[in-house]
Image (cartoon, rainbow, N blue to C red):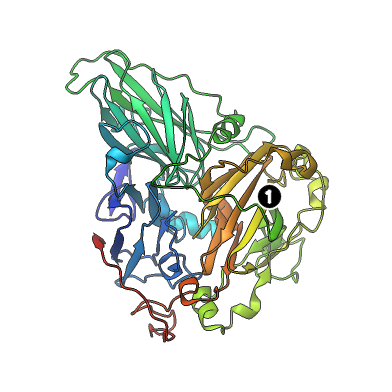
């Protein structure tokens, strides 16, 4: 459809005519069926961000990893369960940049009802989706990024699809998101960062939040006036309308790394929290005092406050004390031959391109989905996979800011290559990964998202990781469980997870430009010893890319869900 903002008509791809798309509201333990009918001109998949998808990788929605895209005028039915998770997740397209407008919330309420929340029952629950508005066709942005052109930026930020009154067309303000509240009432804000490029600061003037959840996991409540949220992340926070009657702005401000990092346009947005329902006066709205846009340390402070909350109905699994696999993974940029390998003229710009890397290797998208080949143990792509190494090929001062600008110092380190990067794990193995952000051509943070698993966030810090200094700081008692972890600007984070979900799972940075540039790997979890610990056959009607034939399933019994909740999206 076409939308008009900032005096310009822009073609956008949306779900059911809505931006954000429809909220899927379910109860813990439900099974969900979503019929996706592709009426757009683009290939589409939908990813259910943060849903564990236990033994259900066929429905994870990653093109050329778990499935072929849904082609125009075709459809596909996704089926998944929401067992063992309570809180806020979200869904989004996983094709090109289209998740900028193809996204919506997933709200999972406890099976014992909202009275079982481990915090005061809110009077109302409100999804708050932070996003960005692009005055350009996002499919064109994706094509340009594939051509190694990264100079397109959003025209504005949004709250629930509204640009707010900081933006106007010929003097007429854009619509603002309005939150009508009643004095003394409590509101559960389900905050989602659906933006493509930016981490956000979020505040409401005159109010403080009590953070109670993140990524569909309860956290030990803590109070703050500032929420910091990276792309892909969700935060549940209580807001009490305890300020005097009036109007109060809520502001979402993108942050960015300071100089010498490249500076880009980062427009804020704001909505209005009204003092009470029916307030018809026009007093000036109070503005919150926002952090400096470059104060990226606020993100480290906020995320360091997260810890898991033990709840009788949702016991938190114990952190694995024994670790089977240790990995140290650096994240940065580099230069590679555009078509893979090392055979290109490194002095000719048209033959090389800027890439993003994990341990100095950039991900090359396979030409056929990996999950079906892994399931059948045969296929052309399996033989091309390159193993993600345990550590980078070279040790240097990873956070040396003199490596950010282009110059002779970083030139010695920037050469890399492209490959379909994978790492294999035995079923049930405990994995520890230390992610280290580097200063190679940029100083950004990195929101790393692992499909099909939650990660225990043991510790995080600024600068270079030091095992002797930092391992004693690990929280092995009540670390937060996250599907999306932020690796701080020029810093590190240590995580552990149990590879207990057989299949092929995407691990990637949730900044769209880093994803397009290759800051990605696939984690392949082998089958366990029983049918209940093995990847089941593909669903009926699961197509191949070439001729729309169906995969032939193995002889594996599969239990039918007892309880189904249906949703329609087209």
The residue most toward the front is 312
Can the viewer see residue 228? Answer: yes
Q: In which quadrant of the rendered view does residue 59 lie?
A: bottom left
Q: In which quadrant of the rendered view does residue 545 lie?
A: bottom left
Counting from the top left corner in percent of width and height, residue 148 is at: 60, 57
Eyeballing the image, is 517 above or below 39? above
Eyeballing the image, is 52 above or below 150? below
Counting from the top left corner in percent of width and height, residue 188 is at: 33, 34
Q: In which quadrant of the rendered view does residue 444 lie?
A: top right
**Element type where label 1 sits in the image:** strand
Q: Residue at x 41, y 50 (%)?
A: 100
Q: Residues within 10 Å of mark 1 (few under 14, many from 20)?
A: many
Q: Residue at x 43, y 58 (%)?
A: 139
Q: Nearer the viewer, residue 199 or 465?
A: 465
Q: Which residue is mark 1?
A: 434
User: For the N terminus, which image quadrant?
Assistant: bottom left
Q: Is residue 514 left or right of residue 20?
A: right
Counting from the top left corner in percent of width and height, residue 346 is at: 76, 62
Counting from the top left corner in percent of width and height, residue 481 is at: 52, 47
């Amino acid at each position: 459809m076409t939308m008009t903002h900032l005096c310009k008509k822009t073609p956008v791809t949306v779900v059911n005519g809505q931006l954000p798309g429809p909220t899927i509201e379910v109860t813990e333990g439900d099974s969900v069926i979503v019929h996706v009918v592709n009426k757009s001109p683009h290939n589409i998949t939908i990813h259910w961000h943060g849903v564990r998808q236990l033994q259900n990788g066929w429905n994870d929605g990653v093109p050329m990893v778990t499935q072929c895209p849904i082609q125009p005028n075709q459809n596909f039915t996704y089926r998944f369960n929401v067992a063992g998770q309570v809180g806020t997740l979200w869904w989004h397209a996983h094709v090109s940049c289209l998740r900028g407008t193809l996204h919506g919330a997933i709200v999972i309420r406890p099976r014992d009802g909202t009275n079982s929340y481990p915090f005061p029952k809110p009077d109302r629950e409100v999804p708050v989706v932070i996003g960005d508005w692009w005055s350009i066709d996002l499919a064109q942005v994706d094509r340009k990024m594939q051509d190694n052109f990264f100079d397109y930026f959003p025209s504005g930020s949004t709250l629930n699809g509204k640009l707010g009154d900081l933006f106007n067309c010929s003097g007429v303000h854009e619509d603002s998101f309005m939150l009508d509240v009643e004095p003394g009432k409590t509101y559960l804000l389900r905050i989602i960062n659906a933006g493509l490029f930016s981490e956000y600061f979020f505040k409401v003037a005159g109010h403080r939040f009590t953070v109670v959840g993140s990524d569909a996991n309860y956290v030990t409540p803590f109070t703050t006036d500032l929420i910091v949220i990276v792309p892909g992340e969700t935060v549940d926070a209580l807001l009490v309308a305890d300020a005097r009657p009036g109007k109060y702005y809520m502001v979402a401000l993108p942050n960015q790394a300071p100089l010498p990092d490249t500076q880009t346009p980062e427009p804020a947005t704001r909505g209005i929290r009204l003092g009470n329902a029916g307030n018809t006066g026009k007093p000036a709205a109070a503005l919150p005092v926002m952090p400096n846009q470059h104060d990226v340390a606020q993100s480290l402070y906020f995320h360091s406050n997260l810890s898991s909350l033990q709840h009788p109905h949702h016991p938190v699994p114990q952190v694995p004390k024994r670790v089977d696999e240790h990995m140290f993974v650096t994240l940065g940029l580099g230069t590679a031959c555009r078509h893979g390998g090392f055979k290109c003229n490194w002095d000719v710009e048209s033959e090389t391109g800027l890439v993003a890397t994990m341990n100095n290797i950039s991900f090359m998208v396979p030409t056929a989905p990996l999950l079906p080949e892994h399931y059948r143990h045969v296929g052309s792509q399996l033989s091309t996979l390159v193993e993600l190494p345990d550590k980078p090929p070279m040790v240097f001062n990873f956070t040396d800011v003199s490596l950010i600008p282009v110059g002779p110092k970083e030139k010695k380190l920037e050469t890399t290559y492209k490959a379909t990067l994978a790492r294999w794990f035995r079923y049930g193995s405990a994995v520890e990964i230390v992610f280290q952000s580097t200063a190679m051509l940029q100083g950004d943070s990195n929101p790393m998202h692992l499909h099909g698993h939650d990660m225990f966030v043991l510790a995080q810090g600024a600068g270079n990781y030091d095992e002797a200094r930092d391992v004693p700081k690990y929280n092995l008692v009540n670390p937060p469980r996250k599907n999306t972890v932020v690796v701080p600007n020029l810093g590190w984070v240590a995580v552990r997870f149990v590879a207990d979900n057989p299949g092929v799972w995407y691990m990637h940075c949730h900044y769209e430009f880093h994803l397009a540039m290759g800051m990605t790997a696939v984690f392949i979890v082998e089958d366990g010893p029983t049918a209940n610990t093995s990847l089941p056959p593909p669903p009926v009607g699961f197509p191949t890319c070439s001729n729309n034939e169906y995969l032939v399933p193995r002889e594996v019994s599969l239990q039918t869900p007892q309880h189904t909740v249906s949703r329609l999206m087209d």
